[in-house]
Image (spheres, rainbow, N blue to C red):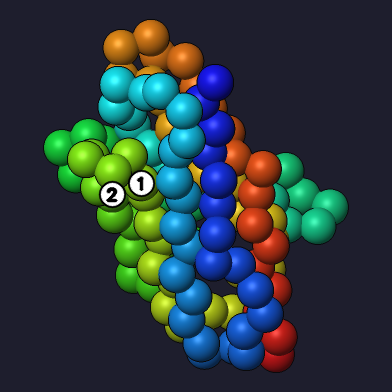
Amino acid sequence: QVQLVESGGGLVQAGGSLRLSCAASGAINGFGPMAWYRQAPGKQRELAATITRDGTTTYSDSVMGRFIISRDNYRDTVDLRMNSLMPEDTAVYYCNAVARWSQQVYWGRGTQVTVSS
């Protein structure tokens, strides 16, 4: 059974940086699109960044220019480098990936990011 596991969350001061990582466990023949979502307290889950298998990226307006998504197709991992963090970036961050051949969608359990002012 494939599982996605996030790591790297924590508490950081405004202006600081964090790097989130997501790794897949279990048998998988690679992923197509991968993404990071986030859900702030009392708000709906929103898309933060996406990356295709060939490395094409998209970002939400709220993180554009501050966050960088990257992936390693051989290791089936996806990272999110977050710079210039603001208190409004406080959220649980979720890894998302679509299996390359079956198109099954997988989610991680999330990692908490808290940005203090």
Q: Position of residue 44 (x, y in %)?
A: 72, 43
Q: Nearer the viewer, residue 31 or 58?
A: 31
Question: Is 116 above or below relative to 2?
Answer: below
- Judged by depth in the image, the label closer to the viewer, 2 or 1, is 1
Q: Position of residue 114 (x, y in %)?
A: 69, 74
Question: Is 30 above or below relative to 25?
Answer: above
> In which quadrant is the C terminus drawn?
bottom right
The residue indicated by pointer 2 is: 71
Which of the numbered marks, if any, corresponds to residue 16? none
Q: Quadrant of residue 113?
A: bottom right
Q: Residues within 10 Å of mark 1 (few under 14, many from 20)?
A: many
Q: Helix, strand or loop at disc 2?
A: strand
Q: Earlier in the sequence, mark 2 or mark 1?
A: 2
Q: Nearer the viewer, residue 13 or 73?
A: 73
Q: Quadrant of residue 100?
A: top left
> In which quadrant is the N terminus drawn?
top right
Q: Position of residue 95 (x, y in %)?
A: 52, 44
103 vs 7, left or right, is: left
What separation in Å lies between label 2 and label 1 (alpha carbons)? 6 Å
The residue indicated by pointer 1 is: 77
Q: Position of residue 39 (x, y in %)?
A: 69, 51
Which residue is at 65% across, 49% downward? 110
Q: Amino acid at mark 1?
A: Thr
Q: Tell me, yes or no, whether the two marked residues, 2 and 1, touch with CB atoms within 8 Å.
A: yes
Q: Residue furthest left?
A: 54
95 vs 115, left or right, is: left
Which residue is at 60% across, 54% downward? 93
Which residue is at 32% across, 28% downward? 31
100 vs 19, left or right, is: left
Q: Residues within 10 Å of mark 2 (few under 14, many from 20)?
A: many
Q: Helix, strand or loop at disc 1?
A: strand
